Image (cartoon, rainbow, N blue to C red):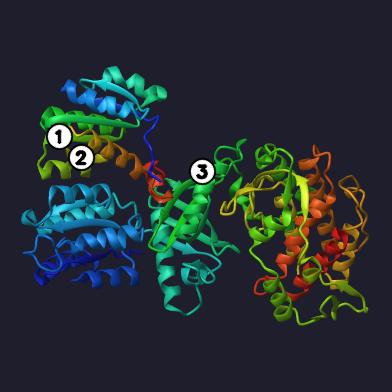
């Protein structure tokens, strides 16, 4: 596989465009040209490049005040912050010393070449050396996709610049090309790469499992998260602030590379010290592991891997949990009402709800209006939390250790929010559509609601012959006992603060139209209804 | 918000005592830890840098860039230190080469306190870019 280096040349004089363009094309590069500021800006918006070659004067070579080429640099490139995705060379007869200094310091150009000393073959060699070295981009990297055939399939649903990538669109083609290039940058020392999609994050980013092969042999399998470059930038900042200083014990996820293209950012997480031959997402692990093994992994996750976060809570304080969860989950009453009206056709009613998938005539409190004006205030702790602890953001290795990825939402929050989110994921999402009926799900929720306080949770009883339900119940109880350990020093700790968190995560699950089948969303609505009754 | 170079360790090297002290006094007013050296001797300084006290920035002032200065620049850059150069006589070719080799800034030597401080501050500001640039600075990529 030999991809061409992509170059944009911005130059007003046709003979220079032709000379430089033809010279670079003869060296195997793909060269686009622009002769004006407007054309250059349009090219940079509609296409992506590895290198831009900019002339300073684009209007009038005899005009000392003409710095249109530098406007491209400081306008479109620096202001649009693509300079970290793009190498830049200024090529001009008219550069001043101060322009050169500014171009190197502010514009971060690779070189500032004097046209009066230009030699086309020497320049071609220089550009070839740039791509072979400084660019840190292996355009010959052989990428072998597994589970999907092409990167086009891997980018569907990705959120870039606020929009989801859709099938058979020009955006899909461009973002797939950029993903290919991003992998060439992230693994520039490798000769080949085997890569498979692991999950689609609800945040709009995606996760890949990658195994690089070097000249000396296979490298360690790593996890690659990629998405809109701004989101990946935020994630790395969170990693530096909240993960590196706290998460340790030899089981810490580390960042081994971070790169970007025009639109995408990518971060390579290494689970150094893991038995990563069997590295899998928590979703896959949960589906195949037995209850005892899952409990062990979760205990290690909350008490060891994330232990330093929860062990350093704030002082006890009155917290507005309603405000915190509504902000975190970004929903409003209107959005929820629409989600029920549009997405759950088998649910009827306003103040009370009837579920046609249940065989009896039982009615339930509609949790949305019932709690619309309520504020749940609790005296509890805040601490650093992951903030998005779902089935895709926990990796489990072959020795049963949990590793975190995705630090986009990390920050200070309700101490129980991570446990409550995972509890909700287990019951409402990992309990699959065909594994049990809505009635069985209702029985599960009613059993879990019988505990009046944390100390009673471990004694909760639920009888069923359904193995999937048994597993979901056992894991939910285990998570609640772990939650109790996090707040056990709080003399006012009561199960209701956990119920508040569960309530908001349940309501949030109702919104996942495109991700979850109806029965799981109905389950979520019933869970929210029962919790609303408890919280009144 | 501008990044401050407060508490940064800065090493100033120049044969000209007046300029060394002018810059040092100016930076010290901003609580930088300034070390002055007339020259840079790897043998003497290596243990200091290896002990985790490597300066955050090495500023070298000179009249012109000759073989001795070039040797000094190379040693500083080879030691993985951040380099800033002020030179009285600074041809554009020399400036370009120094930037290409990795200097963070190369400028005409000035005795204007404000310009000196601005230039140093800009070097530190430039390091506080987005994550991708900082990752590159840290050698991640």
Q: Chain of mark 1?
A: B
> Between marks 1 and 3, how big is the CA–CA gap?
37 Å
Label 2, on which residue? Answer: B106
| Front residue of A15 and A124 | A15
Q: Is residue A203 above or below residue B68?
A: below
- Give x and y (percent) for residue B59: 25, 31
Label 1, on which residue? Answer: B87
> Between marks 2 and 3, how big is the CA–CA gap?
31 Å
- Taking the image as shown, residue A391 lies to the left or right of residue A60, namely right
- Taking the image as shown, residue A373 lies to the left or right of residue A13, namely right
State which mark lies toward you, 2 or 3.
2
Query: Given contact means CB atoms under 8 Å apart, are the residues at marks 2 and 3 in contact?
Result: no
Query: Given contact means CB atoms under 8 Å apart, are the residues at marks 1 and 3 in contact?
Result: no
Name the element at disc 1: strand
Q: Chain of mark 2?
A: B
Residue A469, visible in the rendered structure = yes
| Front residue of A356 and A314 | A314
State which mark lies toward you, 1 or 3.
1
Same subunit, labels 2 and 1: the answer reads yes
Categorize mark 3 by other alpha carbons within 10 Å: few (<14), some (14-19), many (20+): some
Q: Is residue A358 above or below residue A178?
A: below
- Taking the image as shown, residue A113 lies to the left or right of residue A240, namely left
Q: Residue furthest top?
A: B44
Categorize mark 1 by other alpha carbons within 10 Å: few (<14), some (14-19), many (20+): some
Same subunit, labels 2 and 3: the answer reads no
Q: Is residue B141 above or below residue A153?
A: above
Name the element at disc 3: helix
Q: Which of disc 1 and disc 2 is earlier in sequence? A: 1
- Give x and y (percent) for residue A341: 73, 80
Query: Given contact means CB atoms under 8 Å apart, are the residues at marks 2 and 1 in contact?
Result: yes
Label 3, on which residue? Answer: A240
């Amino acid at each position: 596989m030999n991809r061409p280096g992509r170059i944009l040349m911005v130059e007003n004089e046709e003979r220079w465009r032709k000379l430089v363009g033809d010279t670079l094309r003869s060296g195997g590069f793909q060269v686009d040209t622009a002769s004006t500021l407007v054309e250059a800006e349009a090219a940079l918006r509609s296409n992506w490049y590895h290198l831009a070659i900019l002339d300073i004067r684009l209007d009038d070579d005899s005009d000392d005040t003409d710095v249109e080429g530098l406007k491209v640099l400081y306008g479109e490139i620096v202001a649009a912050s693509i300079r970290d995705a793009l190498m830049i060379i200024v090529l001009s007869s008219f550069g001043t010393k101060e322009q050169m200094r500014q171009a190197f310091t502010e514009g971060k150009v690779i070189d500032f070449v004097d046209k009066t000393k230009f030699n086309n073959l020497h320049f071609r060699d220089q550009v070839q050396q740039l791509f072979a070295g400084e660019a840190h981009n292996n355009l010959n990297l052989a990428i072998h996709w597994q589970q999907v055939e092409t990167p086009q399939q891997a980018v569907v649903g990705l959120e870039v610049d606020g929009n989801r990538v859709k099938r058979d669109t020009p955006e899909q083609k461009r973002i797939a090309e950029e993903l290919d290039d991003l992998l060439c940058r992230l693994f520039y020392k490798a000769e080949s790469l085997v890569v498979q999609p692991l999950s689609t994050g609800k945040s709009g980013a995606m996760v890949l499992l990658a195994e690089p092969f070097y000249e000396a042999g296979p490298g360690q399998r790593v996890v690659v998260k990629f998405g809109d470059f701004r989101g990946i930038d935020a994630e790395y900042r969170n990693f530096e602030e909240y993960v590196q200083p706290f998460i340790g014990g030899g089981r810490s996820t580390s960042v081994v590379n971070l790169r970007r293209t025009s639109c995408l950012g990518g971060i390579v997480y290494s689970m150094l010290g893991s038995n990563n031959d069997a590295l899998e997402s928590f979703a896959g692990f949960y589906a195949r592991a037995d209850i005892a093994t899952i409990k062990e992994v979760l205990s290690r996750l909350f008490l060891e891997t994330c232990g330093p976060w929860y062990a350093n809570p704030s002082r006890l304080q009155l917290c507005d949990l309603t405000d915190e969860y509504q902000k975190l989950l970004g929903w409003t009453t209107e959005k929820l009402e629409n989600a029920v009206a549009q997405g759950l056709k088998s649910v009827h009613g306003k103040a009370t709800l009837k579920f046609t998938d249940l065989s009896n005539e039982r009615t339930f409190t509609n949790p949305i209006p019932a709690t619309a004006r309520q504020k749940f205030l609790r005296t509890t702790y805040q601490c650093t939390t992951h903030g998005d602890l779902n089935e895709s953001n926990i990796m489990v290795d072959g020795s049963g250790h949990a590793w975190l990825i995705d630090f986009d939402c990390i920050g200070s929050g309700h101490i129980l929010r991570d446990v409550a989110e995972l509890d909700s994921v287990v019951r409402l999402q990992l309990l699959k559509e065909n594994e049990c009926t809505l009635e069985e799900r209702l029985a599960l929720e009613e059993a879990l609601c019988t505990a009046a306080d944390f100390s009673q949770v471990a004694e909760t009883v639920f009888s069923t012959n359904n193995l999937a339900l048994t597993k979901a119940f056992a894991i939910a109880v285990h998570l609640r006992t772990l939650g109790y350990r996090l707040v056990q020093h709080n003399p006012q700790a009561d199960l209701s603060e956990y119920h508040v968190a569960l309530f908001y995560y349940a309501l949030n699950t109702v919104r996942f139209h495109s991700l979850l089948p109806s029965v799981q969303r109905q389950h979520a609505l019933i869970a929210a209804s029962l919790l609303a009754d408890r919280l009144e | 918000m501008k990044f401050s170079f407060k508490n940064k360790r800065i090493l100033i090297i120049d044969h000209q005592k007046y300029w060394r002290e002018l810059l040092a006094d100016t930076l010290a007013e901003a609580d930088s830890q300034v070390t002055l050296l007339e020259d840079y001797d790897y043998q003497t300084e290596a243990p200091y840098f290896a002990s985790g006290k490597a300066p955050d920035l090495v500023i070298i002032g000179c009249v012109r860039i000759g073989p001795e200065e070039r040797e000094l620049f190379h040693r500083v850059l080879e030691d993985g230190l951040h380099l800033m150069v002020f030179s009285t006589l600074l041809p554009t070719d020399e400036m370009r080469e120094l930037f290409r080799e990795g200097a963070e800034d190369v400028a005409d030597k000035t005795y204007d306190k404000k310009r000196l401080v601005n230039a140093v501050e800009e070097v530190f500001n430039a390091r506080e870019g987005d994550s991708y640039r900082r990752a590159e600075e840290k050698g991640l990529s």
